[in-house]
Amino acid sequence: MSDGGRDWRVPDVRRVTGFSALVVAVAMAFEAVRQLIDGGRPGLDEPDALAEYFERTANGTLVVVLSDTILMTSLIVFLGCFRQLVTTRTPGLSWVADIGFGAGLVYVAVTLVGDAMTGGAGLDASGGDADPVIIRALIEGHMLLFGAIGCILTAVVMTSAGFLVLASRILPRWTGVFAFVAAGLNLLAVPTMFGGTDETSLFSVGGWANAVLAVFPFLLWVVLVGVFTVRGRERHEQWARRRRGAVGALR
């Protein structure tokens, strides 16, 4: 491609897919480490401890929000690249890819709204005079977005991805099966919205079930797909050469 005498190389979609997945992996690891450093958040029914916790971790909370924003931005790039990989190989599946891509964008938007709520709690506490009532309201809103709402959207993304992988064969078959399993786990986590707000309870709206059953399998799938996409670049180029040869023979 040229513009005014300057040549512009089209980015390699497979490399961009792998790079965006790498950023997702790094951000995910960073957030896990930050969670271990900050420790568990006190219960929402402990106002004094809750205010003290957010005053102590205000800057760390904002850093995690920034990290998650980078993660979500990379996820947009990844989903766009994945859609391109599928539609290039099998244009007839573009409508399924559009459903998954659209659900992914809504998931990113919902997650960023939840991050803004958490960031608001951190900002409220950054001055050293945290209001536990405000913090509780923000965290409860974040729990629903991070929990049941996000799980349903992720299930749509993963169901679409699983079907696309199996139908287009752009990735190993087991990655498609993994996507279907991740979709099922996300649906299993949806009822946690009725489990209360106690984070120490596995199946509460803010418990570990959401992270273990829903978020982690989804992001792990993203990382695995990124790795296999980069490793399969040479095979893709061989397939593209065979396709060009077949088209040339028909002419």
Image: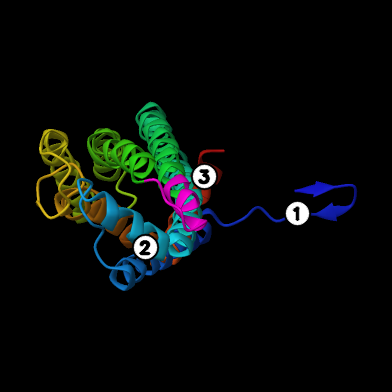
Q: Dot 2, crowdedness within 10 Å: few (<14), some or many (≥20)?
A: some
Alpha carbon distance from label 2 to label 1: 33 Å
Closest to the observer: 96 or 41? 41
Amino acid type, callout 3: Ala
Q: Which quarter shows the C terminus?
A: top right
Residue under label 2 = 28
Amino acid type, callout 2: Met
Q: Which callout, 1 or 3, points at the residue further toward the start of the chain?
A: 1
Can you give x and y, in whole percent of width and height, for residue 44 in the image? 23, 46
Residue under label 3 = 249
Alpha carbon distance from label 3 to label 2: 48 Å
The magenta-colored residue range is 120-131
- Residue 8's label in the rendered image is 1
Can you give x and y, in whole percent of width and height, for residue 222 in the image? 34, 55
Can you give x and y, in whole percent of width and height, for residue 42 in the image? 23, 57
Which colour scheme appears in the figure?
rainbow
Can you give x and y, in whole percent of width and height, for residue 137 in the image? 33, 37
Residue drawn at (75%, 54%) of the image: 8
